[in-house]
Amino acid sequence: MKASAPLSVTTDTGGRRWPEPPAESVMVEIRDLGLSYGARPVLKGVNLAVPRGQTVAIIGPSGSGKTTLLRCVNYLARPTEGEIWVGGTLVGQRETHGKLEPAPECILRTHRTVTGMVFQQFNLFRNLTVLQNVTFAPIHANGRDRASAEEKARSLIARVGLSHKLDAYPSQLSGGQQQRVAIARALAMDPKVMLFDEATSALDPELAREVLVVMRELSEEGMTMLVVTHEMSFARNVAHQIVFMEEGRILQIAAPEELFSEDAHPRIKTFLAH
Amino acid sequence: MKLEFLLEHLPMMMRATIVTIQLTLVTLVASTVFAIPLAIVRMREYTFGARMVAWYSALMRAVPTLVLLFFVYYGLPQIGVVIPAFVTALVGLSLSAIAYNLEIIRSGLMAVDRGQIEAARALGVPGWRIWWNIAIPQAVPVMVPTYLSNATLVLKGTSVASIITIPELTAVANEIVSETYRPFEILLGATAIYIVLGGVLTLAAQVASRQWQAK
Ligand SMILES: Nc1ncnc2c1ncn2[C@@H]1O[C@H](COP(=O)(O)OP(=O)(O)O)[C@@H](O)[C@H]1O
Ligand SMILES: [Mg+2]
């Protein structure tokens, strides 16, 4: 499969141009995505469709725009061109009087509640305990009551193996434990998609492994995931598709067995040889 | 040196001390209340509001408090605003205290890790919630030591209000001196009171920074 993902389809009804939602089977669709910082283009027309329940690994040299791409999916970064669809919703835009316009912050927030994000530096709230970290967004972004938020948080924290650390502060945890809490925190919002940005890059191999185990389980349970990673074994063994990015473009999208074979793009072969 | 002069006038000086404490506390509270939103505005660089606040802050820190106080004392009645002397002092002292406090608060807020703010935004948490529950609780420990040392300056700065007839410690001490001609004893007493009050603030700063460093 080459990097020629679907182009944006627009229908013309009554003089209105309206983007066509992606197929029901597609959870995330990125169309003609472009982003420039000032005059400097960072993403130059990215197209990618992630079917429901699939894990897509995104690899590529540093500075190629992987982080920016993930940040566009939840509109932490506003694209300058193109569309992002998550679960059938056009992210970051809204319709008023038959026209699309940038969504205000309050609507962006509801769009963001359906994507979970996990960062390289964990970014746990350092003034809150593990339990409070996980209940914070359900209570304050989704308006859940504390009791049910805590019940759910406890089971998620148990799932990442940290029930004995409920009342610990982030500074009392190892990096691997912090990252597992960060995953539980994202899952607490019942996201449709999980975005991982080099979630294990700040961890030494042993701690990275405990995080990768959790990520693998999530993937196997059918979570839709976009995973920026340097862990080639994870990309190879867990991902359904691998995206190779370079200079703001997708150079190739392929199944792992193809990308790690002789048929891969020569540039990718040299990248993987390192 | 005859300490009985001091003892004799001690009750008067204590009443004046209370005025000094009141003026200090009210100035601190008022200037902090104004400084918080201004610090937030000032943080959004490149906006008109931020530039205005930056100018305000630079100006107010450059002009002596005494001059500011005169501006309020003589200036406001000229434009038809007549306010009690205590309020005049409060406004004059607050003008510069706001400037200092907003810089202190801003640097505290700037120290908050961007990553956590981004994580909260990614979760869809409203901006004010992020400020209130994440940014501020982490910024406060950073700024408390500087804030309290600035509070000591505010305390000392209240002596400037003596010039506009506020019966605070310096004014009253001065008055007693001119009645008794015992400057040494009386000023020694006033100095001791300032040292005690300042010491309380310094102590609070130390306790606070030790408290938060521990975590
Ligand atoms: N906020 C920003 N302002 C300006 N340039 C940025 C910003 N964020 C990222 N960039 C630039 O965009 C390019 C892509 O960055 P990034 O998406 O972080 O790449 P990757 O994650 O693949 O290493 C880099 O050259 C980076 O310097
Ligand atoms: Mg990156």
Image: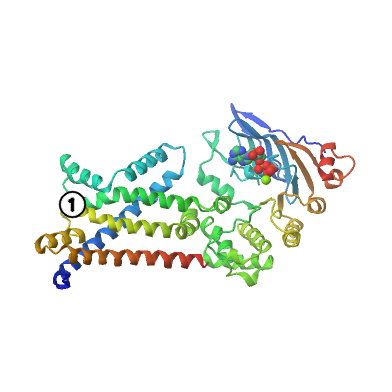
- Vertical arrangement, residue A261 with respect to residue B145, above or below: above
In the rendered view, would you say B99 is above or below B145? above
Taking the image as shown, residue B154 lies to the left or right of residue A22, namely left
Is the residue indicated by label 1 positioned so its CB lies within 8 Å of ligand 1? no
Q: Ligand 1 is located in which of the four quadrants?
A: top right
* Furthest residue in direction right, as rendered: A262
- In this orientation, which residue lies closer to the viewer: A190 or B39? B39
Look at the image and tell me in which quarter the N terminus of chain B lies.
bottom left
Apparent side of residue A113 relative to residue A259 in the rendered image (left or right): left
Residue to which mark 1 is pinned: B163
Asked whether B69 or A219 is in front, the reply is: B69
* Numbered disc 1: secondary structure: helix
Name the residue: 58% across, 49% down.
Answer: A112
The image's colouring method is rainbow
Residue B148 horizontal/vertical position (percent): 38, 60
Q: Is residue A108 above or below residue A135?
A: above
Would you identify the image quadrant in which residue B181 lies?
Answer: bottom left
Residue B84 visible in image: no
Q: Furthest residue to the left?
A: B179
Three-letter code, disc 1: Ile
- Percent x, y for residue B156? 28, 57
Residue at screen point 90% across, 41% down: A262
> Residue furthest toward the top?
A15
Rendering quarter of residue A182: bottom right
In this rendering, position of residue A161 left or right of residue B155 = right
